[in-house]
Amino acid sequence: MSLPGFVLPQGENGLFRLSDQAARTANASTAQGATDGNGLAASTVNVGAGQSAQGPAAVSGSAWSLQGGQGSVTVTSPAAGSLSVAGIQSLPTNAAPSVSHKYLIETNPELTNLKQFMGSDYLLGNLGYDPDKAQLRLGDGLYEQRLIREAVVARTGQRYLAGLSSDEAMYRYLMDNAIASKDALGLSLGVTLTAEQVAALTHDIVWLEEHEVLGEKVLVPVLYLAQAEGRLAANGALIQGRDVTLIAGGDLINQGTLRASEGLSAVAGGSLVNSGLIEASERLQLLASDSIRNAQGGIIAGRDVSLTALSGDVINERSVSVHQSAAGNREWISSFADSAARIEASGDLSLAAGRDVINLGGVLDSRGDLSLSAGRDVTIASVQDLQHTSRGSSYLDERVTQLGAEVSAGRDLEIGAGRDLGIIGSEIKAGRDLGLQAGGDITLAAAADESHFYSQSKKVTRQEDHVQQQASELSAGGSLGIVAGQDLNLISSRVSANDEAYLVAGGDLNLLVAQDEHYSYYLKKKTKSGVLSSSSKTTYSASGQTLARGSLVSADTVTLQAGSDLKVNGSDVVSTEQTTLRAGNDITIDGATESSFSEHFEQKKKSGLMGSGGIGITLGSASTKSTQQNTTQTSRASTIGSVLGNVDIQAGNDLAIIGSELVAGQEINLIGQNVSISAAEQQSRSDQRYESKKSGLTLALSGAVGSAVNTAYETARAARDEDDSRLSALQGVKAGLTGYQAWQAVQQEGGMTSDNAGQFVGISLSLGTQKSSSRQTQEQSVAQGSNLTAGSDINILALGSGQAGEDGDIRVQGSQLGAGQDMLLAANRDIILEAAANTQKLDGKNKSGGGAVGISLGVSDSGAGLSIFANANQGSGKEKGNGTTWSETTLDAGQQINLISGRDTRLIGAQVSGEQVSATVGRDLTLQSLQDSDRYDAKQKNVSGGASFTFGSMTGSGYLNISQSKIDSNYDSVQEQTGFYAGQGGTRSTWATTRNWTAV
């Protein structure tokens, strides 16, 4: 692309001149011919040749043609695809130019003050380079600004970009965009952008690239336009003017460029659709009788921008196309997301629709105020990028990535919906105040990234599944207000404000969790077959986890108000100065369930001919099977707090706090008809099982010597298999000693004779079976109490419904309440302070049994002895255990504690302590301590017997063994004594009828 109006400097008297070094180079290089006496005459600079490899967005050349007079010098740098400096990571080099020669072309200091013009020194400095030591640049600030100005005009037909009004402001804007994009795009100084980097641009930039001019390698500022603008080439559809007005009786569709240097107005009798560029330096107005749609990377930009769809929708959508292909049993699915559709304003931005306002994965950005208004619904949501590869039912690799929408305002941001408002996996930001209002429901929810992998082969199966929530985030530099006519739901979302956060629902208000999920599975099967035997091994393991990702409301002061119920589940509400929760009906603050499990299974099977231990073989079968399973269930606590101020919670009906935390720098005030503060339950379970079976016909050595030889054989084999050389040698010594001891045993018995041959060495053949099994299960339940901590006072009031004696209870179970100063519990009816139980259970069983019959032949030099034998065994056992411990309720105040009940006050596993303790009881006062207990019972019984008969001597023998054990254990003890514990202020108690003190 040629940039007209540029000539190489001539002599010393023009606005621009070659530096001393450049002038010498030019004079030495210029071909001999006619000149005007100053070197080169009537020269031009051509920019753009050979740059097409970078895509249509690149606005600089890789070829510079310097022509003049009768001679010419042409200096060419390689095209982008073969640029030799692509590997440069750090510029400048050590061979830095002197300060006086920073530029090849410089401004004549006699005609202007160079300090007035911003140049690439600004870009280099912000990239961490010293401009005075940087590589030689093509020109100084004024020259660079002119170069960029001409590139913008030639490329866009527009004097300025982004509604700016000066060359310096535009140059700085482009350099700021480059600085902000450097890390995200991986830009390297001096290196031309790749096509992928150009496609990823979201804003126009200037980048310094290395080119060779007059034999010098210099840094040249190159203009790159963002993708949507880059597609709208100068030879495409273009409507441009100072003030542009378009009126269409039907639909208005723009795939090119609509540009106004001042104002632009477009009116469509039907719908208005944009996938190109609509831009105005001043006011931009789009009006459609039906709908307005901005998609496929379209950009709508101006100073003050308004879009109005009278009866339809306003849609800003990041377009995602899906490509699906298949070959045989293979399938590929890939989605391709365009650049985010953008609607931008350097001033104010307004979108209004008769029906819906929809922003799907797009960007709405205003540097001033921003308002979205819909007669029906407002939806701001992410779009999905899907990558899927599969091969029949044996292979799957799938990934889902959320591409969230963005809505941001430099000042105030307001979103209003006549019906419902939904924000899914997206981000909303306001520099000042942020307001959301809907006549129906408002939902802020997370969207999930997912990855799934499955692979199955003949021997191995693997599976991995992961789901991870991407929260919606709302933030305000000032105050934030969310008002729903019906229900307001935050699901794994975050809301924050520097000043006040005010969330109001006409119906229910819920702060809830979404679950991250992780699952892993592995299965391996191994088989081995031979002529005489076969074996198999199966190994299986699996694990999984679910994690609660709660919601968060954070601000200097926070107010949550519900017309009906208010629920905080596994979420946090925190402030600096004041936190207030109010509901017309019930308030519930509890933990969210998290869980995990693991499982391991192993099974081994053998059949055919196998070793029997020692020198012997068995023809039969053997198998073992083991299983381990573990599960846990925990609670992710909610937190309600204020760093410096109060926490005030008031329910029209019941107030329940379960396994959660309340923290206040000052007071905690709880009010409801009934107030309950209790513990959440955490559970774990472990289950182990083992089974073994073996049966078959066994041929082996027998007798004393045979037994010793078997032992020596096993020891020698262990020595052979041992990795450590010293351990191997030690096992070898043991094998030798065992064999020697076998010979000694023969000598000590007077040697082997025909009468005792079978007792020393022989061969036995037996048919037998043996099996065993065991199981053990352990269960545990642990109370996770609530914690209330106040720097000043804690006040808890149970007012009841107004009917005497019907309700108005305060119940604190397994929780801890601590106040730096005073604590007051006042109940219309009863106060119940009690412990929470922690339990554990153990249950186990085992059994075994088997037997064998066979014959044994003992051999000596004078004959042989034959024996027959039989044996059997059986065993069984069981164990049971259970225990209970108590998590006590504690009330602790730095000064005074007052308990006031209209009827009864009961302390069952609780301690109340303060400098002064006072209890005013309308009827009964009961104090009871609780005992920790433990029970364990175990029984085991084993029976074995056998008989043998020897032919020749016609003698026989037999044996019978019976063993039995039994354990009974019981334990009961009070660990913590229930009571009132006072300091110097003492204890004062009054009650109307009875007082019961019990310690069991």
Image: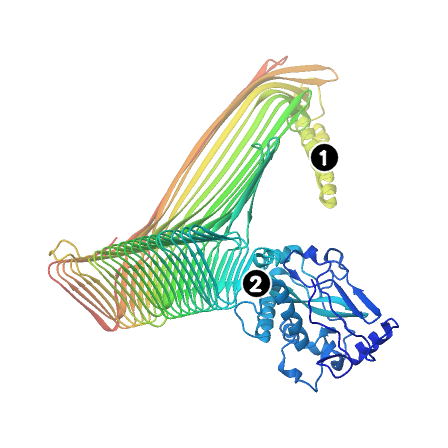
Label number found at residue 4: none
Q: Is residue 996 something that shows in the picture?
A: no
Residue located farthest toward the right when viewing the structure as drawn:
32
Where 396 falls versus 305 (above or below)? Answer: above
Q: Residue at x 30, y 52 (%)?
A: 931
Q: Could you tell me which secondary element the residue under label 2 belongs to?
A: loop
Q: Looking at the picture, tell me which residue is in the foreground, 387 or 27.
A: 27
- Which residue is under mark 2? 203
Q: Looking at the picture, tell me which residue is in the foreground, 661 or 55.
A: 55
- Which residue is under mark 1? 716
Q: Is residue 434 something that shows in the picture?
A: yes
Q: Residue at x 64, y 65 (%)?
A: 154
Q: How many marks?
A: 2
Q: Earlier in the sequence, mark 1 or mark 2?
A: 2
Please state if 802 lies on the left or on the right of 782 as rendered. Answer: left
- Where residue 682 appears, x then y in whole percent? 38, 49
The answer for how far apart the CA atoms under marks 1 and 2 are is 76 Å
| Quadrant into which the N terminus falls | bottom right
- Where residue 920 appears, x then y in whole percent? 16, 65
